[in-house]
Image (cartoon, grey):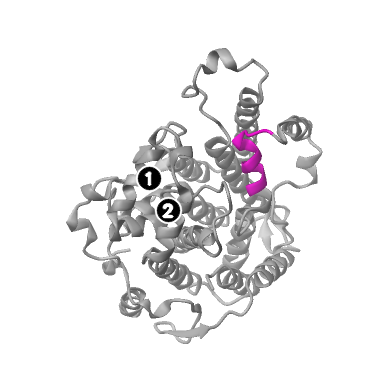
Amino acid sequence: MSLSRLNPTKKVIASLIARSSYNRMKFARHITTATHLQDKIVMKTETKNEWNRALSEAEKIVGYQTSYLSLRYLLSDEITNLAMHMRKLVGSTHPLVGTGKSLIYGQGNMQTWGLIVLLVSKMAGHAKGILESEQDKSAGVLMSQRTLAEVVEMVRTANMIHSSGVLNLQHLQKSGNDLSFDSDLIFGNKIALLGGDILLGNASTQMAQLKNQEVVELMCTAARDISDSHFIGERDVQNNPLPSDPSKKVEEQMKSAITSEVQVDEVDNRKPFNLKDVMGSPENEWTLRHTLANGTLLGKSCQSALLLAKQSEELQKQAYFFGKHLALAWQASIDLEPYKTELPLGHKLSLVSAPILFHLEYDSSLYTEIKKGIETVDDVNFYKIHKEVAKGPGLERTKELQSKHTLLAMTELYKFPKSDARSALENIILAMQED
């Protein structure tokens, strides 16, 4: 975020972000006047218990579970048949099995995005004149906002299934001769494609039922951003992203961490992002990848929720940037997760995670090991990468990156009036912070 967009108080916050004194500290903030922010430091003693408690309390506020898989979905013929077919893959090596596990048991439970959208909806309220039949008074949100919450989770889940649940068979030796038509690999690909398409189809149907052209346009641009995220930078044969060669980085890109954030959406977040002078700069590259893959989806979902509530453009913009920075802080937390313990046998790392990108800036020789994954990631020594990154500065810089986006999300959050929903969002943010 450029400093020109920050008011004097935020400039102070932005300057503090660059300091390493934020490490291992959790932040909660409150507004004391209309123009001044007072920071208070909260030391965390629990993590998982705090996370579960924060979600439980948030669910009670809006009456919404942390997954779109409500009873009507579980009992639908499409989902039931799909689940039965997926059982056939248990015990196979198809990546869809791992994707399914990560969706259910994954760190941070990314399937809470619908909950966040509803909390933002309740926090902001809705304009006068909306018919009572369109309101869920018990939860304090609109029925259309509940539909939107389900849409964002379906789109998110469909993307995860399509991107990590499909195996490229073309590079396998004699794949056409050795794989039978009903092999686990081919069958798993069909189920992954079908499952993701079912979710996207349902999401499209529900968006159309909202009968709001602006919301449909906004959410479609989020889907476009997700698609764009799969086609930037170098990729291996399985379309897994690879970091840019650190030897090709441009010095001009490395001047300041504060000015490195993608700024296209500050003017018009419906326009495509510009890739110029981004790849090769650790923070620029990481921010662009995850803004496209996650940030705009959550941000535009929060924005759409307020659009449905007929709130002002200013509030909509605040909701967008809150969702975007929350998603980026969340991703930084996920990137740190593998380095809390020793790397389990056979576990693979994301080669474009923040710790690895920052380490490559510090020691470009590690890129020699990463390049081995161009043909297949099985050739990469992930244990070596994990060990080297754990000793370098990448983890500390990732924690600072997480603190940066946490503070930016908090800045937007505290522009909204104090309420139970705002407190619930604050608790969720604090619960996901790194120890």
Q: Residue 227 colored magenta? A: no
Q: Which residues are magenta?
A: 92-102
Q: Which amino acid is tagged 1? A: Ile
The percent position of residue 367, horizontal first and vertical second, equals 32, 48
User: What's the distance in space between the residues labelled 2 and 1, CA to CA?
Assistant: 8 Å
Residue drawn at point x = 52 percent, y = 72 percent: 416
Q: Residues within 10 Å of mark 2 (few under 14, many from 20)?
A: some
**Residue at label 1?**
370
Q: Is residue 434 visible?
A: yes
Q: Earlier in the sequence, mark 2 or mark 1?
A: 1
Asked whether the viewer can see residue 243, the reply is: no
In percent of width and height, residue 112 lies at 63, 56
Measured as percent of width and height from the top left, residue 329 is found at 48, 63
- For disc 2, the marked residue is 385
Q: From the viewer's side, name the closer residue of 75 and 350.
A: 350
| Viewer-nearest residue: 2 or 349 | 349
Is residue 257 depicted above or below 177 in this figure?
Answer: below
Q: Quadrant of residue 261?
A: bottom left
Dots 2, 1 in contact, CB < 8 A: yes
Q: Position of residue 342 (x, y in %)?
A: 55, 60
Q: Is residue 254 above or below residue 239?
A: below
**Taking 183 as reference, is 42 left or right?**
left
Q: Quadrant of the N terminus?
A: bottom left
Among all residues in the image, which is located at the extreme top? Answer: 177
Q: Left or right? Give the position of 398 relative to 27.
A: left
Q: Answer whether residue 96 is magenta in the image.
A: yes
